[in-house]
Amino acid sequence: MQQQSELENFQVDWSQVSKPKLSEKRTTKQEIKQNVQTEINVYDRISNCFRYRISTLITQMGKPQYYCKFDPKLKKTIQSNSNQKKSLEQQLSKIAAQLELSCRFITRSMFQITRQPLLKSMGIDIRSILNKAMNDKEFQKLYLDLDDQSEEQRKKEEETEKILASLQTLQENEVREEIEKLRKKHNLNQNQNLYVIQGEYFNNMKTLFNSLGWVEIQDVYTQIYDFNFCYLKKFFHKPIPEQVVSRFASTKLLTTKFGLARSLKSCYILGGIDSNTFFPRCYDLSDEGDFEDFLEEYKFTFAENYLKKNPRDEEKILIAIQLLNYKLMPIQDKINRITVDEYPVCTPQQWKILYKKPEPKQEIVQFNNPNLMESVQQILQNVASVDPQFKISKGENIWVTKPCGLSRGRGVKYFKELEEILAYTFGAKDVNFVAQKCLENIMTIQKRKFDIRQWMIVSDIQPLTIWMYKECYVRFCGVEYNTEDLKNRYAHLTNFSVQKHNEENQEEKLMMDQEEFIQILKERGFDFESQVRQKFKNIIIATMKSCQKSIEIRKNTFEVFGLDFIVDDDCNPWLIEVNASPTFAFSTPVTERLNTMGLTDLGEFIVEHVYNKTKKKNYGGWELIYKQKL
C-alpha cells in the first residue's frame, strides 16, 4: 500500500517524547492505548486528527520540528534513535494514543510571539504591528473595552476569594454531624432533603422540593446540605460523597473556548467522528503549537478563498495553487519539506505577493488563460474532496477571535486581515484568545444571523450518561447580516446580553421557539428531526466522549450545559461552544415559557432520577440519548 510505504522507514524513539503530567485519578497512556478503537483505520485517524499539524506529527515520531534551531531546549527533548525501527501500523498507533493523551489534558505550551519563525516566514514584524495598534484609536478602544471587561471579571473573582478566605472549612465527619443535627431539627425522613439553590428563576423547582417536605437552606456558602444546585457560583468546598451536587469538579476541556478546541482533536480516535464535520477549525493563540497551526491554516484558507473569488492575477493564482498542493501532499512529502532548511509552505516573497499585491482592475487587465483557470477548478475540487470544511468559506476569509475566560459575547471580534487578528489578540493585556474560522455559508432568517441554544444534562461520567431536552430555541441578531461590516456587533453576535443594548431591537423578535423554526425549515425543504435534532444528538455524544476522561468521576453529581449551534445553508448544524451555567432568564416570551417548562422538568429529573433512582428514558422533556456500555 502507498500509505504504508510513505512512513515505513521512519525511526522513532518514543522514550524521548515529552508527555503531559497526569494526576493519579486520570487515565494513563497505557489505558488509552488499550481503549483505542481497532475497527477504525489507524492511518485515517492520523490524517483526520492532524490535518495540517505535520510539525506535531514529526515531533511525536521523534523528528525535529522545523523551528528546532530557534529553540535549543526542543532539540534536547526531541531526538531520534537510529537503532529503533517500527512498522507503519505501530508508529501510527502510538501517534494516535499520544494524540489522544495530549488532547485530553491541558498542556498548553506558552511562548513569546516575538520569537516565532513562522511569522518571519510570512514577512511579519510583530513588534511593528503591535506598536502601530497601540497608537491606533480604534484598537485603543478595543483594548480599553476588553480591559474593563477583564477587570470586572477579576473583581468578581477577588470578591469570591475574599468570601472563601473568611469561611471555615469543616472536616467530613463534622459535615455529617451538622447535617444530621439539622435534619433532626426539621424532622426529615430519608426521602426528604436539605437543599440549596443558587441563582434566580428556580421557583418552580423550589415549589416541587417544598411540596415533598424538603427544607431550603438560604446560605449559599454553607457546607450543610443534602443537595446543592450550584448554578451561578463555583463550589466553595469539596462536597462529601453523600452530598448531591450539580457541578462536576472540572469541565475546562468542555466549557472553555481553548479546552473544547483541544478536546475535539481526539474526537475521531474516540468516536470515529471527525470533528471537522461539525466544529469550525479553532486555534488557541496562546499555545505555541496551536499558534503555528493557525498561521499555516491562515495561509491555506487565504489561498483557497482567493481562488474562489474570480482571481485575475496570474502570479498570485500560481502561488495559491502551489500552496493548496502542499496542503494535499502525502505525509511523507510534507515531512521531507519541513525537515529541510526551508520554509514549510511558502517563502516571505511568495506570501507578500499573494497577500499584499493589489489585484489588477478587471476593466484594464483582460485575463484569459483557460488552462490556468482549469487548474484553479481542479485544485479546488481536490481540496473539496478531502476537506469537510471547504464549503464554510465563500471567499471572505472571516475569522472570529474570542477571549478565554469571558462570556456573553464580551471581547468577541471579527476580522479578515491577519495583522488585525495579531494586533488585537496580542495587544490586549493578560488575555488569551482563540481564533476560529467563521461560517460564511450560514443560513439566515429574514436576512438575520441566528444560532440555536440546546440544553443537555450529563448525569454520570462513568458510564457516560447524557440527556437532551426536547426543545431548543433560536436567538437572532437584531440587524441584518453583513460581511462587509464586521464591527457591528448587533449584526454578528446573537447573545441577548449584547442585543438588549440596541435600542432599535424589539425583544420579541430576538427569539423564536422550536415549532416556528421547524415550519421555516419545512418551507425551505429541510426536515428538522433528521437534519438538525438527530445531528445535535450525534455531535453532543461525540463531544462528550472527547473530553470524558478529563472530567473527574464523582457519583451523586450531574450538570446542565447549554450548547450553541449555527446552521449552514445546507441545514448542517455546527457546534460553536458549550456553556456551563446556561442562562434560564425570562428575557423574552419564548425563554419565559421554555425556561419555566425546562426547570419544572429538571426538578422532576432531580427527584425521580437522581434521588429515587428510577430508570426512565424520559423525565418531562429530558430524553436519554446515550448511556455508555461498560
Image (cartoon, grey):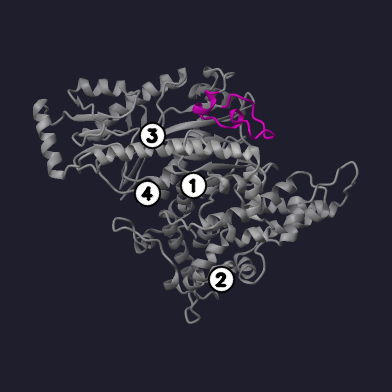
10 Å crowding of disc 2: few (<14), some (14-19), many (20+): some
- Amino acid type at mark 1: Asp
Question: Which residue type does callout 4 highlight?
Answer: Gln
What residue range appears in magenta? 477-501
| Contact? badges 2 and 4 (CB < 8 Å) | no
Is 615 placed above or below 105 here?
above
Inter-mark Cα distance, 1 to 2: 42 Å
Q: In this picture, is 69 found above or below 522?
A: below
Neighbor class of circle 1 (other Cα within 10 Å; few <14, some 14-19, many 20+) is few
Q: Position of 471 compared to 224: left or right? A: right
In the image, farthest residue toward the front: 135
Left or right, 441 with reference to 35: right
* Residue for badge 4: 548
Q: What element carries label 4?
A: helix
Mark 1: which secondary structure? loop
Along the viewing direction, whichever of 314 and 225 lies nearer the viewer: 225
Of pointers 1 and 4, the one earlier in the residue sequence = 1
Picture layout, residue 142 above or below residue 389: above
Q: Can residue 55 be seen in this view?
A: yes
Secondary structure found at label 3: loop
Q: In the rendered image, which residue does mark 1 sit on?
A: 430
Q: How far apart are marks 2 and 4 (CA)?
A: 32 Å
Question: Which numbered circle lies on residue 7?
Answer: 2
Q: Find the distance from the CA under tag 4 to the CA under tag 3.
A: 19 Å
The residue beneath circle 3 is: 581
> Which quadrant of the structure image shows residue 415?
top right
